[in-house]
Image (cartoon, helix red, strand yellow):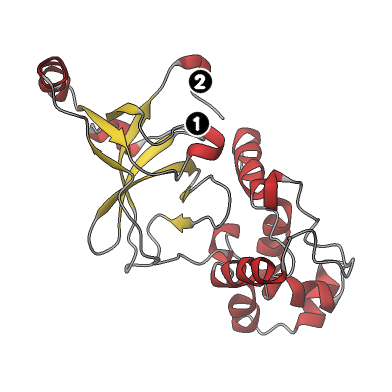
Amino acid sequence: MANGTNEVLDAYLKRQAKGGKPVKDGMQDSGEVGVCGRQDTEEKERRVARSMNRIREIRERVGLTQEQLAEMLSTTANSIWRLENGHTRLAQHSMVRLGKALGCDPAKLILNVPAEVKSDVVPADPNPVIDAIAAHIATRGLHLYKVTGNSVAQVVGVAPGDTITVDESEAAAAQPAPGDVVLVEIGAERVRVLRQFIPPNLVITNRRGANMINNIGGDPTVDPKIVGVLLRDKENSRP
C-alpha cells in the first residue's frame, strides 16, 4: 500500500478505539483488553470484531495452528487467539504481517458484513433554484443529495443535513483517489450509502461505535459497487 493509503486506513482503525483513543498493538501479548467502559459495551465490540475477522478461517485453510502462526510472527498463541476472537483490535500493520504469513491479501482478513443498512442520502430538497442547478449539472454526471446518515461524519466531516455534489460519471466511479468519499450501492436493495475509499478495493465507514468494511468484488450478498465520488473543496478533500 502507498503511504497515503496506510495513513487513511490506520486512522480508520485507530478510530475503532472507544472515544478515538489509540488502539493496542495487535501483536503484543499484554493480557489487557483495553478501556471499553461497561462490560456489555466491551462484549458488543468484541462481537463486531469477530464478525469482521477471517483470521481463523484462513489460518485453518492453509493448515496452520495458532502456535505455528504465532512462531512465524514472533508472538504467542494467546495473541493469535485474542486477534481471532476480537479481544484485540486488528491494526493495519498487523493486517499486513498476517497477510504475508498466511499468503493472502490483507484485505481478505476482513469479512464483508451483510448488515442491514439505511440509505445515507436522499435527493436534495426541491426548490426552483436547486432544481434548475440540478438539471444543468446532471448533464455532466453530477447530482445533488442531502445527507441523512452519519457513515463518514466522524473523520471526513460529511454530516446529516449537508447538501453534497456527487460525480456519478463512469470515469469518476472507476478511479476514486485514496481517502475519497464515495457513493456506494450495497445489498440486495441496492441502498446508496457513503463510504471512504481505501485502495485497492476497500470501502469503509468512519464514525464512532460499530463500523463496516466491505471488499469491492467480494461477498455477492453485499456486492458493493462504487457509483460516484463526492466533490469537495481542495483544502477539505482529505481527512
Residue drawn where x is 36% and y is 64% of the image: 116
Answer with left or right where residue 93 lies relative to residue 154. Answer: right
Vertical placement of residue 83 versus 7, above or below: below
Judged from the image, the secondary structure of the residue bearing numbered disc 2 is helix
Looking at the picture, tell me which residue is in the foreground, 157 or 233. Answer: 157
Q: Quadrant of residue 108?
A: bottom right
Between tags 2 and 1, which lies in front? 1
Q: Secondary structure at mark 1?
A: loop
Q: Residue at x 50, y 43 (%)?
A: 199
- The CA span between labels 2 and 1 is 9 Å
Q: Which mark is residue 3?
A: none
- Check the picture and name the quadrant holding the N terminus: top right
Q: Which residue is mark 2?
A: 236
Residue 204 against residue 105 in the figure, above or below: above
Q: Percent from the top left, x then y, of residue 192?
A: 28, 48
Q: Are marks 2 and 1 in contact (CB under 8 Å)?
A: yes
Q: Say left or right for 118 vs 130.
A: right
The residue wearing badge 1 is 157
Question: Residue 58's spot in the image, x, y percent?
Answer: 60, 76
Q: Position of residue 26 (x, y in %)?
A: 77, 61
| Residue type indicated by callout 2 | Asn
Q: Quadrant of the C terminus?
A: top right
Which residue occupies the foreground of this view, 200 or 82?
A: 82
Q: What type is the residue that disc 1 sits on?
A: Gly
